[in-house]
Amino acid sequence: MSVARDIITVAAVPAGVFFFFAGTVGLLRFPDTLTRLHALSKADNLGLGFVVLGLLPQTGGLRDGLKLISIWMFVLLAGATVSQLIARAARQSGSGR
Amino acid sequence: MTEFLTTAVGLILAMLGLGLVSILRGPADADRMMAAQLIGTAGIAVLLLIGTVTGVPAAVDVALILALLATFASIAFVKKGLSRLETDGAGPGEDR
């Protein structure tokens, strides 16, 4: 049982780290604001999601696991809202091209 | 497992440093704000990993506060941009 938990962690946490890497490289390399926003949302949602998924088998109990999942849900909601707002601000300020 | 998760913490902290470079050179204000948001999310991931590695459950609470503050920072940025556009005579925002 412990081995199965460790396998989930070893598989999911590097996936999260990879998505953080992809998001950072995209933020540095993509040509304009809206494509950079696209790269950023991948790092936000999938990167943190995989890290949380990898940490879930290591938590002590149900309450800690639910706390991790609720943090991820909050980041998802906030990230989706803030992405729309930043995209609109970028378009209105004329740098969205 | 502890060494593995600590390595993950180090890698994500390296990404966070790259994000600081992105804040430095981002051409528009929105790019700098996006880099700040990425750093906020990376900080949340680092805090969750550290909370599991060291067995300190309070780190998860700190991660939750960081998520809240990163969101407020981004919303404050957008509100500032909108109010500046309004004073420039671009008309009021369509919804507030």
Image: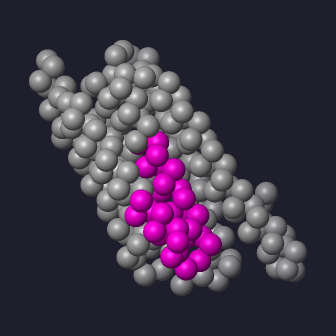
Residue B90 appears at what percent x and percent y? 82, 79
Residue A72, compared with residue A89, is above or below; it is above
Q: How many marks?
A: 0
Q: In the image, is B12 to the left or to the right of B60?
A: left
* Quarter of the figure with residue B93: bottom right
Q: By what rule are the colours in the image chosen?
A: one colour
Magenta-highlighted residues: B17-45
Q: Quadrant of the N terminus of chain A?
A: top left
Residue A86 visible? The answer is yes
B62 up-or-down from B44: above or below = above
Magenta run includes residue B84? no
Residue under the point 69% across and 61% down: B77
Q: Position of residue B14 (x, y in %)?
A: 35, 56
* Residue at 34% over, 16% down: A60
Answer left or right for A33 relative to A62: right
Which residue is depicted at the point 60% across and 70% down?
B30
Q: Main secondary structure of the magenta part?
A: helix
